[in-house]
Amino acid sequence: MEVKREPLRVQSLNAHQLLRGADLEGANQPAHLEGTELEQYVQERVLTTTLDSTVAWARSNSFFPLAFGLACCAMEQFHTAGPRMDIARFGFEAFRASPRQSDLIILAGRVSIKMAPIIRRLYDQMLEPKWAISMGACCSSMGVFNNYALVPADKFMPIDVHIPGCPPRPESLMHGILKLRKMVQDDPDLGWRERYDAYGTEEVLDVGTSSPEPAPEPADPGAVVSTVPDDQPMRDIDGA
Amino acid sequence: MPDATGLELLAQELREAEGEDAVLETTFFRGRGTLEIEPTHVRAVLERLRAAGYAFLASVHGVDYYPHEPRLGVHYELLDMGRVDRITVKLRVATDAPEVESVTADWPTADHQEREIYDMFGVVFRGHPDLRRILMPEDYEGHPQRRDFPVGGEPVVFTYNERDALGPM
């Protein structure tokens, strides 16, 4: 039996017809618009933008913060994710447990001298693009703990937004995150992170350049009872 | 608490056992008995107090008496858990030779507390099994809880002084 294939109607429409609103039925839309009517019709239905701003718009509405707190500010950070403030409204609710999955680090609390290199390492492990928020007085200006034990975050890593307060209320943190969202949408890269040598710091596994591992030797046929034929090496568990 | 008379009796026992100079002073203030002892006798005195019932070393503290000399002090808080009775043993050492014998061998709980006193005040405990800094980074210089240690730590970076703090950009 011969199957008769008809081309989809949408494929047969050209762009001119699509802009004029010709749909599959071809009957619901005004078929022929001309002049100012056509221009108005196009303006109502077509949006032009750049890829950069579209990507920035997507990024700025889906931050993945690092699940990480240093001190009392972390309590307010939890409440920001809670039902009253509910930053899930803006798409920031997915707190990731690994720096490799997150793109926003919120320094919620005081940074001690001993903790600073660890935090810098967490920041370095995050994949590009990444942003940092310094939450509270302690990690911006050391606040009431301005003594031998603490170090301000600006000393060792680039901070995009500082949120004052001791601790800041959840509204403040949300306001700061929204400021960061605005910053990401307007100008994702202000170019000042180079000062901290903070580009290209991701730790990437060196694959491909090293020689592949030699295939495991075939098992001794007498020693091991196996359903795998002996001339086939055992496959790696991830099937590489 | 031992009452004032009991404290004097305890001090007299210690003097008879360890020598007249073992206990320098006794203080009874607001129901709290304190023995101030010579630093060289610390292990023997604590052992005798343990035999007298104070078998639990509740805590070890460091003190800086600046500007009085000898400046550094170490306090041992002992607890008799049977009678719910406490006594404080104090000793003082000078900053130029801040050495005290460690009591970690007798009281294992003193291990980390002596490390903290070494970290914060610079009192060296002779015979401590692992006398390292416990809170500050290992390459830190100075002992930050001494009274003459500068209070302000890192200068805060603002826009007007960022070149001084972070170097040329």
Image (spheres, helix red, strand yellow):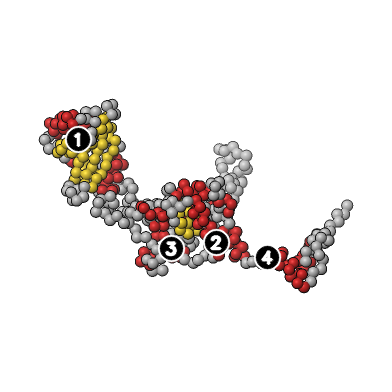
Residue B98 visible in the shown view: no
What is the spatial separation of the Cα atoms under label 1 and label 2, in whole angstroms?
66 Å
Q: Chain of mark 4?
A: A
Q: Quadrant of residue B149?
A: bottom left
- Separation of residues labelled 1 and 3 (CA atoms): 58 Å
Q: Both on one chain, marks 1 and 3?
A: no
Residue drawn at x 33%, y 54% as measured from the top left: A147
Residue position for label 1: B28
Residue farthest to the bottom, as pictured? A35
Residue A182: which disc? 2
Give the spatial CA distance, label 2 vs label 4: 21 Å
Give the SS element for disc 4.
loop
Q: Chain of mark 1?
A: B
Q: Nearer the viewer, mark 1 or mark 3?
A: 1
Q: Residue at x 58, y 54 (%)?
A: A90
Q: Which residue is mark 3?
A: A196
Residue A46 drawn above or below residue A218: below
> Closest to the observer: B48 or A54?
A54
Q: Residue A22 appears in which quarter of the rendering?
A: bottom right
Mark 3 Cα-neighbour bin, 10 Å: few <14, some 14–19, many ≥20: some
State which quadrant residue A116 falls in. Answer: bottom left
Residue type, mark 4 in image:
Leu
**Quarter holding the C terminus of chain B?**
bottom left
In the rendered structure, find residue A47 and report the number of the disc placed on it: 4
Q: Earlier in the sequence, mark 3 or mark 4?
A: 4
| Chain-order first, disc 2 or disc 3 | 2
Q: Are marks 1 and 2 on the same chain?
A: no
Determine if marks 4 and 1 fall on one subunit. Answer: no
